[in-house]
Structure formats: C-alpha cells, structure tokens
Image (cartoon, rainbow, N blue to C red):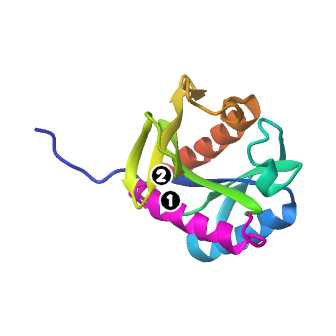
Amino acid sequence: MGKTKKPKAVKLIVGMLAKSQKLFNKAEELFIKDLGPIDYKSCIIPFDYTDYYKKELGGPLKRNFISFKKTISPEKIAKIKLLTNIIEKKLSAGKKRQINIDPGYVSDSKLIMATTKDYFHRIYLGHGIYAEVTLKWRKGGFEPFEWTYPDYRSKEYIGILNTIRNNYMNHAK
C-alpha cells in the first residue's frame, strides 16, 4: 500500500482573453489583492483561433498570460477558478462578460487548466469545477495532447508556458 504525501507546490498561472489592455490591467489589480504579486506577464497576443468568444466579449480579442510569485497547493485550483468567475462578473458590462479568465498551474511535468466544462478527459474537483491536463512536459518542452485546444498547441503559447515552467523550476530549487 502506498503512503499518502503532501503534493509539491505548483506555479499558478492565468490566461486571459479580452479586447483591451485596460481589462487585463483591471483583472490583474483584483488578482493581486487575492493571489499576491505577479512575477511574469507575457506579451499581448492576438487571439484568432476561434470566433467562439466574439459574440460575448467582442473583438478583436487578445490573449495574455500571467503567473504569480507565490506557489500554491494543487487542490486550491478549484477555489481559484471560482474566484476568477467572480472577477469575470465584476468586470462584466450588464450580463455580458468582457473578459474570459482561465486559471491553471504549471508543475514540473504538466500544465493543468481549470474549467467549468466536463468532458471525458477532465476530472471533477468539486463545486462545479473540473481539471484538465492540457500539456505534458517531455524532452525539454511542453507537448499537447489530442484534446489540447489549438491555441495551446501553438509555438507561441508553448514558448510562454515553457518560460513560466523554467521560472518555476529555477525558484523551486
């Protein structure tokens, strides 16, 4: 019989979609209040992989990734997803979201993203939140799975997430 043990702390990340830098800045202010200082911000990336969010969020959409200085215990990701849902509502205009916020975490071996959508490859965490292994670490870089969304398969996103993982590994020593 295996013995249970406490999991290693992981690097919290957030991916955001919005049409303006102003929305990213407002969300970041709210994150800092609840999650602490940000230690990495990606460049702003045009988001043209799908029109799925256009009706609700408008366009043209942009993507931004951030990570946080303080690591978290992996089980906290469900509560953090609930928090990001609250932040999305705070930044809404009427009944429409203006920003999409997806939290996740990077460990030494994977990128996990939290979602409210169930599917065969997602694990239920509680409170209506699921976790998905979106990328795996292999041979010096992240690699996608068959279910990984096209944007997370891109060299640009993988490069950003590799940088966040490298920062995590350098500080974990």
Quarter-wise, where is residue 83 in the image?
bottom right
Say above or below: 19 vs 30.
above
Check whether the beta carbons of the residues at disc 1 and disc 2 lie within 8 A of each other: yes
Write the residue at 61% across / 47% down. 167
Write the residue at 71% across / 41% down. 160
Q: Label 1, secondary structure: give it.
A: loop
Tell me the crowding category of disc 1: few under 14, some 14 to 19, or many 20 or more residues within 10 angstroms, Cα based.
many
Q: Main secondary structure of the magenta part?
A: helix
Judge by depth and name the residue closer to the eye, 43 or 55: 55
Residue 44 seen in the figure: no
Judge by depth and name the residue closer to the eye, 18 or 164: 18
Question: Is 149 one of the magenta-colored residues?
Answer: no
Write the residue at 47% across / 35% down. 109
Q: Earlier in the sequence, mark 1 or mark 2?
A: 2
Residue 21 seen in the figure: yes
Which residue was labeled with disc 2?
A: 10
Mark 1: which amino acid? Thr
Checking the image for residue 71, the label placed there is 1
Mark 2: which amino acid? Val
**Where's the N terminus, which quadrant?**
top left
- Is 164 displayed left or right of 75 in the figure? right
Question: Is 77 one of the magenta-colored residues?
Answer: yes
Judge by depth and name the residue closer to the eye, 122 or 52: 52
- Is 20 displayed left or right of 138 in the figure? right
Tell me the crowding category of disc 2: few under 14, some 14 to 19, or many 20 or more residues within 10 angstroms, Cα based.
many
Write the residue at 77% across / 71% down. 26
Give the residues drawn in magenta, as a range.
Answer: 73-96
Where in the figure is residue 3, as x and y percent of width and height? 16, 45
Say above or below: 151 vs 78.
above
Where in the figure is residue 24, as x and y percent of width and height? 78, 63
Task: Give the number of callouts.
Answer: 2
